Image: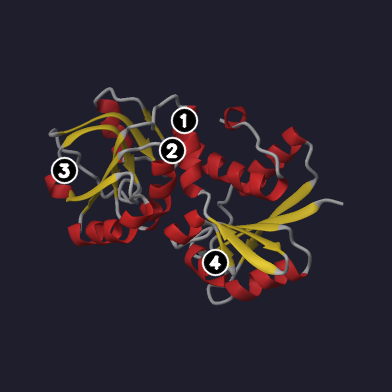
Amino acid sequence: MSKQFAVIGNPIEQSRSPELHHAFAAKTGVQLNYAKRLAPLDGFSASIHDFFSQGGAGMNVTVPFKEQAFAECAVLTERAKIAKAVNTLWMQDGQLHGDNTDGQGLVEAIKALGWTLENAELLIIGAGGATRGVIYPLVQAGVKKIVIANRTLARAEQLIADLKQAVPQAELSAVSLDNLAGNFDIAINATSASLSGDALLLPQALQFKQAYEMAYGKPSSFLDQAKARGVPASEGFGMLVGQAIESFRIWNGVKPNLKDFL
């Protein structure tokens, strides 16, 4: 019998998780069914407990429930604890387990592009949940220096204060967007600014060799500026596939090859 999986969110129609997991299953011979579940904004907890009480095997969590999922879990992975958000749930020994695969998804996507993370110096624009979720996996992958740039400098400084102990081997620093300068291996946009049309203007004093936009499928002023500079650039579809592959591996013990799905 097929194992039952789902992705839960609100809204949920836009999710591409079912097509990805069914494609992974077809490639690896795993028998599963994967559906979308819309949860009421005030009904997340009831929705997930209902799913698992009916024999559900695993669940992905998307906006706006990742922080709530974190609070629901009895057992958390190290990267979930650091991210303070969960996008992958499963039941084990009667306890709800949670992981955050977003950062690993980003790492896998960057590696698939042939870009180097070992000893790399990175700029991440934005100091929200998306950035919090990727710092630990990036450092585990060998990144040695990360500068977090944010409109509100205090927010970036607070994020670094929160994360410093988790990644002692890396140098973390904060800068306000107004004072953005320097030379980086990879610049990553983790803000929604380039999606909302609220253009991020990258100063000429800022140099980078490669550019990664976490979002996908929408116009991005960040990517436009990178391309105008002749810098190799990618949108975030690979990260989406990469985080899904990591969830699939946790649940099914099989890891599809990312490059097969790009």
Instruction: Give amino acid for label 1.
Output: Lys
Q: Earlier in the sequence, mark 1 or mark 4?
A: 4
Classify 144 as above or below 8. Answer: above
Which mark, by number, is residue 141? 2
Judged by depth in the image, the label closer to the viewer, 2 or 3, is: 2
State the SS at label 1.
helix
How are the colours assigned in the image? Answer: secondary structure
**Upstream in the sequence, badge 4 or badge 2?**
4
Residue 157: give x, y in percent of width and height. Answer: 22, 58
Q: Which mark is residue 180?
A: 3
Is 217 or 252 nearer to us in this picture?
Answer: 252
Query: 10 Å neighbourhood of mark 4: few (<14), some, or many (≥20)?
Result: many
* Residue 232: mark in rendering: none
Kindly indicate whether the residue at mark 2 contacts the one at mark 1 (C-beta within 8 angstroms): yes
**Residue under the image location 64 percent in, 42 percent down:** 20
Mark 2 crowd level (few <14, some 14–19, many ≥20, 10 Å Cα)? some
Per the image, label 3 sits on a secondary structure element best described as loop
Q: CA distance from mark 4 to mark 3?
A: 34 Å
* x, y percent for residue 129: 39, 58
Q: CA distance from mark 1 to mark 4?
A: 28 Å
Quarter holding residue 74: bottom right
Residue 33 at least partly seen: yes
> Mark 4 = which residue?
69
The residue at 54%/61% (across/down) is 11
* Residue type at the position of mark 4: Ala
State the residue in front, 234 or 38: 234
Measure how far apart labels 1 and 2 are at the Cα level: 10 Å
